[in-house]
Structures are given as C-alpha cells and as structure tokens.
Image (cartoon, helix red, strand yellow):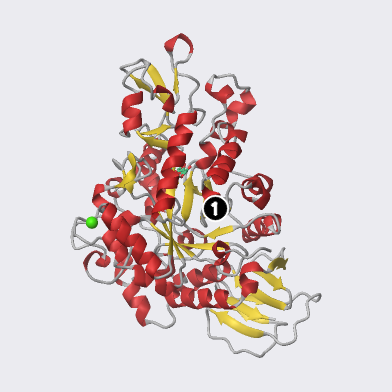
C-alpha cells in the first residue's frame, strides 16, 4: 500500500461557531481557534478541518455561502484567517477547508444577478424551471424544506434548492460555473490551505429526466437519490483533480450522506480514478437512526460489526477509508451507540480504541475527545438548527409536543453543536457573553480542564491511542481480519502488516462478557498495548472476563 501523509494523519474537525469565542459576542471565532491550536496539537492531530468560515447569512450555519473569498463577519476577517493558517503551519498542523459547491446562498452576488432577469448573463448559473401550465416542476419535501422549488415573483420561474430555500443549487452544466468554482479553489490553494472536505458533492450533477418530470414511478420513490450520484459528478471531480488539485500536495474527502455501495465509493476514491482521496460514508451513523427522520431506531452489535467490516474489507487494496464517530450533522456517538451516563467514560474510550485501530484516516469531532454527550433542551426554542425545527414541525402533525421534543433530543444535529466545554466556569469557558446556543449543563463535570488533570481521562486515552498509532504502522496500514463475527456482544479483529500483528477486543455491552480466542488462532507472546480498565498482563488470551465496554489492544 502506498504511504501517504493523509493516510497517516489524524484529523480534528472544528465547528467554528461553537468552538471558542475570543471577544464575548457569544459566537466562536477564528481568534478563538488560534488560542486553542496548542491544545489541538497536544491531542496529536495533524490536520484541522474547518466547517465553513466564509461570508454567510447563516441560514444553515455557514453552509450557505454568500462570498467564497471572504470571511463571515462574526468569525473575523481575512487577516485573522491568515494568522490561523500560519499558526497551524508553524505547529505542523495542516488545514483543510469545507468546500460547499452544490449551492450558494441566495445572497451571493451571482444569485442576486441571476434572479434579476431572465436574460441576465448569470441566469444560467442556477437551475430555473417552470412546470406544466406554469406550475411547479416535479417536487418533493426534504428535511430542509417542504419543497425543492421556490417561485421567484419577479421572473415567474422556480429555482431549485435541494436544501433550504436560501441555499440555491448551482448549475454545474454551465461551464462558467465550473470555471468560477475551479478558480476559487485554486485561490485558496495558492493561499496555502492543505485540502478540502467536499460538502454534498454527489448532488452537484442533476438528473435531467428528474428535473423535466420524466421519471418512472420506481424512480420517483427513490426521491433525492434519483437526483444524485449521476455520472456527471465523476467528470467534474476528475477535471477538478487533474486541472487544479493534482498541482498541489493536498487531501480531499467527500461527504456522501446518502446510501452508497462500496463499489460506488471505490469509483470516487480509487487511485487510478483521479477523483478524491476519501469519502465519508454514513452507513454506520444511520444504523441506529433513520436518515430521513433523524430518529433513533433499534440496532444490533452484529450489524455494527458487519458494517464496519464491509467497508474495511470492501475497500482494502481499492481505496482508503475515512473513520469517524461523529460530526456536526450527527448526535453524539456515545449517546447513540454507547452509554452516556454510567459508562460514559468506558464507552467513549472503547469507541476511541476502535476508531484508532481500523484501516483509514481517523477524524475526531470537537468535544468527542472529552466525551461530550447529547443535550436535552427543555424547549424547541432552544434549538438553532433549521433541520431540527423542520422535523419537529413535521412530527407535530402526528405527535404531541412532548413526544416530538423527545425525538429532537435524540436525533438533533444541535446535539453536536453545543459549545465546546473548556472548563467549569460560566458557559464552560466558551464565551464570557451570551452563547448563541446553550451550553450542555453537564459542563461542570465534562470539560477539558478537568480531563487534563486526570491521567485516566478520555482525553488522555485519545492521546495514548494516537501515539500508539503513530508508533505502529500496522494500526494504519495493516490488513483487517475480523474474528468472532457472529458474537453478539464482542467486536474483535486482527490487523496484520508483514511481521506485525495486533488484536483488538471490544466489549460492546454493559455486562461482563467472556471472550475466548477461536481455536484457529494461536497467540504466544501477547503484549497489552492499551486498555480502558486496569488489567494484569500475562494471563494468556484463552479466556478473558471483559468488563462493561472494556477495550483491549494487544500486540501479538
Ligand atoms: O450535509 C449534507 C446532507 O445531506 C445533510 O446535511 C442532511 O441532509 C441533513 O443533515 C439532514 O437530513 C452537508 C453539511 O454537512 C450540512 O451541515 C449542511 O446542512 C448540508 O450539507 C447543506 O450544505
Ligand atoms: Ca466571537
């Protein structure tokens, strides 16, 4: 397997609005991030992924960009950005940007011009349509909006928006759009950024038959899936790679929110395709939650293991995985799949042991390294996320307020967006002002300062795991070999690289569970590399009595 820096890196995702506020206006900002660079470095992260910091009216927290070459007012200005980039590079941290190019804000200059008249030269930068008899073209509801078309009163045509009506889809069939975006990407690369996380990129090329309403009923049922993953996406990515990205030493990771097969994924990331380095696939994230409704659903440990295994084995030798437990669109992983009360620390460490011992590039989402959990706000008014509000409204058609709020509690994207918990002072040390979204009340116990003081904290466990990963190439490049695949509580696998092997044992349950090595595997001199409990080494691996959420990693 070819060695690459981005395969060996650990990425730390920052959601700038909720990370650190430097000036007391209640909103995280670039100077706040700069003040925490040493902390990020201390975890062992090599790359920062910044969620969008561009100019934006904030309909969707910065994922609605009104100027790609400027910084959101609340976050600072371009000089602050230059300081941040220099500060990161000084510490040998690379910085990747979020690239939101499926849509722009309706307040982007291009759209202001586009909507001004039907013959404006920027009219075709976006997708304008009228259905039969002047009505709406074929429509559907999304979690962002009851419709994907919005009528523009001025020109009496509808524009397409797959997200909110303030996030207008660009028309990638127009070569000028492509040229403008490629130029912009080049502009940031020339500034020195180290790559991109590509937002919702599978939606950039639309299915014309869908747009014209010529779809069969089975196609109609697959809804948004039918609009996306069109071959045009590959053409655009390849061109972007060949003409722009390949001229720099950068990394790319594309977000594929909808269902995708391993084969389709490989088509985006296999070396010879010259498209992307990695994709995020959400199959694991949506095992225990419905993607459409953001609502919890039952899941099984065996399915969790099989899902991980499917991607580990499926991409082995074909492409490189990205590994993540959470991000700004998902509830906190330990609240969803672990235990965020009695076994919060144990389960957070167990999932970390998995994250850093699989093949792929691990991504940490801010706060995960201290075991931050979901939040339960008393009122829907306390939620800020546009999707959470839409789904709540939709749920109210069938449920009462209490039931609807319960779904918000478990599934809301705001679970991940509450302010980073730095210490036990007011507002968790995030801001001296009034935070834009409430702090999780558990900050007195769960915060960075407390974690720093405790050698056994989740934070220090992350540090140890990352150090181990850097010292043992087998953890990065080793072949993945699952064992005990039918076991209902234990997730276990071997990683092997030339003469080196490690054995990972994870007890996914809240009960003590017996582990015994399958007969086919003989281990002589095992050495415990790390565990989330105090265990005595040297007793052999034939029978282990694992405690709740116990994780052990052995060199074998
Ligand atoms: O996410 C893409 C996406 O499809 C999800 O946002 C999903 O649709 C949504 O969470 C609820 O169903 C990216 C960003 O990560 C997300 O934060 C943005 O809201 C979205 O794109 C639009 O830019
Ligand atoms: Ca601020």
Of 226 and 231, which appears nearest the observer? 231
List x then y, in percent, for residue 105: 35, 36
Is the C terminus in the top left, top right, bottom left or bottom right quadrant? bottom right
List x then y, in percent, for residue 497: 70, 72
- Callout 1 crowding tier (Cα within 10 Å): few <14, some 14–19, many ≥20: some
Residue at 69% of width from left, 54% of height from top?
A: 318
Is residue 234 placed above or below 526 in the rendered structure?
above
Residue at 28% of width from left, 62% of height from top?
A: 32
Q: Quadrant of ligand 1?
A: top left
Q: In the current view of this chain or complex, which residue is farthest to the right? A: 520
Is residue 365 placed above or below 244 in the rendered structure?
below
Of 35 and 505, which appears nearest the observer? 35
- Residue 524 appears anywhere in the view: yes
Residue on which disc 1 sits: 288
List x then y, in percent, for residue 244: 51, 46
Q: Is residue 57 left or right of residue 167?
A: left
């Amino acid at each position: 397997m070819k060695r690459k820096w981005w395969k060996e890196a650990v990425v730390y995702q920052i959601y700038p609005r909720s990370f650190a506020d430097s000036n007391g206006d209640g909103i995280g900002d670039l100077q706040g991030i700069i003040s925490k660079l040493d902390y990020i470095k201390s975890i062992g992260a090599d790359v920062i992924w910044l969620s969008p910091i561009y100019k934006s009216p904030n309909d969707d927290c910065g994922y609605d960009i009104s100027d790609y070459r400027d910084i959101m007012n609340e976050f600072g200005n371009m000089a602050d950005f230059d300081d941040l980039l220099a500060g990161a590079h000084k510490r040998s941290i690379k910085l990747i940007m979020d690239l939101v190019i499926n849509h722009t804000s309706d307040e982007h200059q291009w759209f202001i011009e586009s909507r001004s008249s039907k013959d404006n030269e920027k009219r075709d930068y976006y997708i304008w349509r009228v259905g039969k008899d002047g009505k709406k073209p074929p429509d559907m509801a999304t979690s962002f909006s009851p419709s994907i078309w919005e009528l523009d009163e001025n020109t009496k045509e509808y524009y397409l928006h797959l997200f909110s009506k303030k996030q207008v889809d660009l028309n990638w069939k127009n070569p000028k759009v492509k040229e403008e975006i490629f130029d912009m990407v080049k502009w940031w690369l020339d500034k020195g950024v180290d790559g991109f996380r590509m937002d919702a990129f599978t939606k950039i090329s639309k299915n014309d038959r869908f747009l014209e309403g010529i779809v069969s009923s089975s196609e109609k049922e697959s809804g948004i899936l039918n609009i996306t993953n069109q071959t045009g996406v590959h053409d655009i990515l390849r061109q972007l790679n060949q003409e722009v990205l390949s001229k720099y030493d950068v990394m790319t990771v594309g977000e594929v929110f909808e269902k995708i097969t391993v084969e389709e994924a490989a088509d985006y990331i296999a070396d010879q395709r010259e498209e992307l380095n990695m994709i995020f696939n959400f199959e694991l994230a949506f095992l225990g939650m419905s993607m459409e409704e953001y609502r919890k659903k039952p899941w099984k440990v065996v399915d969790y293991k099989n899902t991980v295994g499917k991607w580990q084995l499926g991409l082995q030798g074909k492409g490189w995985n990205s590994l993540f437990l959470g991000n700004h669109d998902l509830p906190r992983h330990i609240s969803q799949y672990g235990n965020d009360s009695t076994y919060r620390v144990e389960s957070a460490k167990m999932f970390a042991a998995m994250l850093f011992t699989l093949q792929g590039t691990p991504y940490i989402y801010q706060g995960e390294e201290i075991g931050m959990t979901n939040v339960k706000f008393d009122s829907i008014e306390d939620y800020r996320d546009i999707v959470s509000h839409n789904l709540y409204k939709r749920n109210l058609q069938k449920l009462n307020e209490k039931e609807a709020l319960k779904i918000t509690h478990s599934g809301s994207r705001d679970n991940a967006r509450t302010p980073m918990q730095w210490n036990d002072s007011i507002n968790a040390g995030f801001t001296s002002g009034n935070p834009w979204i409430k702090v999780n009340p558990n900050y007195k116990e769960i915060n960075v300062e407390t974690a720093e003081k405790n050698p056994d904290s989740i934070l220090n466990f992350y540090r140890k795991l990352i150090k181990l990963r850097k010292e043992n190439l087998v953890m990065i490049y080793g072949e993945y070999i699952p064992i005990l695949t039918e076991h209902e509580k234990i997730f276990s696998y071997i990683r092997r690289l030339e003469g080196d092997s490690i054995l990972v044992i994870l007890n996914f349950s809240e009960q003590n569970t017996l582990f015994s090595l399958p007969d086919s595997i003989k281990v002589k001199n095992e050495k415990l590399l790390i565990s989330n409990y105090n265990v005595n080494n040297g007793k052999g691996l034939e029978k282990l009595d694992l405690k709740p959420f116990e994780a052990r990693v052995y060199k074998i």
